[in-house]
Image (cartoon, rainbow, N blue to C red):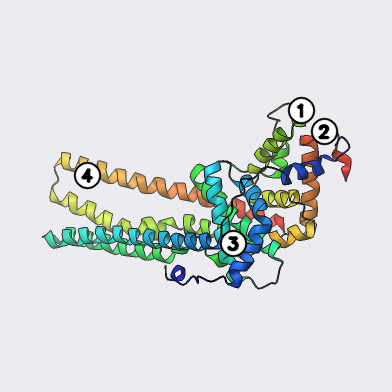
Amino acid sequence: MKNESPTNRMQEIWQCQPVEGIKMSVEEIHKRATKFEKKIFWRNVREYVAGAIAIVFLAFSIARSHNVLDSSAFALLIAGMVYVMYQLHRRGAAKSMPASAAVGPSLEFYRSELKRQRELTSTVWSWYLGPFVPGLVLSALASAAHSFHPRHIAILTFWYGLIAAFFLFAWRLNARAARCLQRMIDDLGTAE
Amino acid sequence: MSEAGAIPAVKSRQDELYHEAAGSFGPAIERLAHAYEADPDIRRDLVQEIHIALWRSFAAFDGRCSPRTWLYRVAHNVATSHVIKQRRSKGPGLIGLDELDNLPEASSRHEAADRTQDLARLMHFIQRLQPLDRQVILLYLEGMDAASIGEVTGLTARYVSTKVYRIKGVLARRFNAGGRNEE
């Protein structure tokens, strides 16, 4: 072993490392594939049900409201929610990898994964955060119009300020992730 | 769900291809998963995920590349996807081969004589690499030549050759200071 080259030795060490010997029969694969599909199905159902509950709640609020400004705010929030749900449905493929996507050369796959992630993060404002803004702004105005008492205005400012801060934080976090992903994509340009 | 419901009970060509590939490359899949995931429980899940993706992919196998190339592509792509997901949730910085070569040693030289220590260090070394560098080094360690690595990764043979040359240099410096001139 003394004269063995270090890289050949590392190849030998690598290939002879102990493994657990995990084996899956074809029948087990079938079962797990079915289970996986079910998991995806129920995950989607959960998301749609959560969205539907929010929409029903907002619709109920419209029915109870006697103020046009309030009703309009709730309607805009519903519209925003529907748009976001549609986008989540459309972009659903981004959450799990289709079988066909995994068979291409690694470089191509890696680049497309990074681009997909960058697209999701760089456009988060337009498809996830932005659609709620008109409803929230109108809702803030409607709430302020109920009373001009300084304490009421202060409470509203606090809560809507908190929401705005959350939106800003989420947007900046995603923008930073998008820049990081873009750098990784640029680095791949030199790998061909 | 409808797709899953349509899975036939009898063994198809897809099943046979999977059975052969998993039989021949099962240990290689585990080694690959080890290089992508340090946590043993998550690693077992990753191995199973690779097996399922492999089985699903064989439905579209057209024979334009060897089953081995196909298997490594699928396995590396699933593992890369895993790294991207983990990276977004945990955020450990991955680095390139050159940066890794410049990092200080965690353990002393004489410890490197031990195979287990060497394997642990090698694993630690690989787990910090960016996906593409990691793929090249793993395929190299599996004994594949530059052309085969290029086929799996989609990188040019010239690029792979350069990368492999550098990998050999890094391994030589890291694991045996005297073995650098083996080229």
Residue under the point 27% across and 54% down: A136
Disc 4 and disc 3 on one polypeptide chain: no
Element under disc 1? helix
Q: Are marks 1 and 3 in contact (CB under 8 Å)?
A: no
Residue under the point 16% across and 39% down: A151
Element under disc 3? helix
Q: CA distance from mark 2 to mark 1?
A: 9 Å
Q: Nearer the viewer, residue A128 or B109?
A: B109
| Quarter of the picture holding the C terminus of chain A | bottom right
Disc 4 and disc 2 on one polypeptide chain: no
Q: Position of residue A126 (x, y in %)?
A: 41, 60
Q: Which mark is residue B109?
A: 1
Q: Nearer the viewer, mark 3 or mark 2?
A: 3
Q: Nearer the viewer, mark 1 or mark 4?
A: 1
- For residue A17, side relative to residue A44 (left or right): right
Q: Which badge, 3 or 2, comes first in the chain's sequence?
A: 3
| Quarter of the picture holding the N terminus of chain A | top right
Q: Which residue is mark 2?
A: B177
Image quadrant in which you'd find residue B168 = top right
Q: Are marks 2 and 1 in contact (CB under 8 Å)?
A: yes
Kind of residue sitting beneath label 2: Ala
Q: Are marks 4 and 3 in contact (CB under 8 Å)?
A: no
Q: Position of residue B136 (x, y in %)?
A: 72, 52
Kind of residue sitting beneath label 4: Leu
Q: Position of residue A92 (x, y in %)?
A: 44, 63
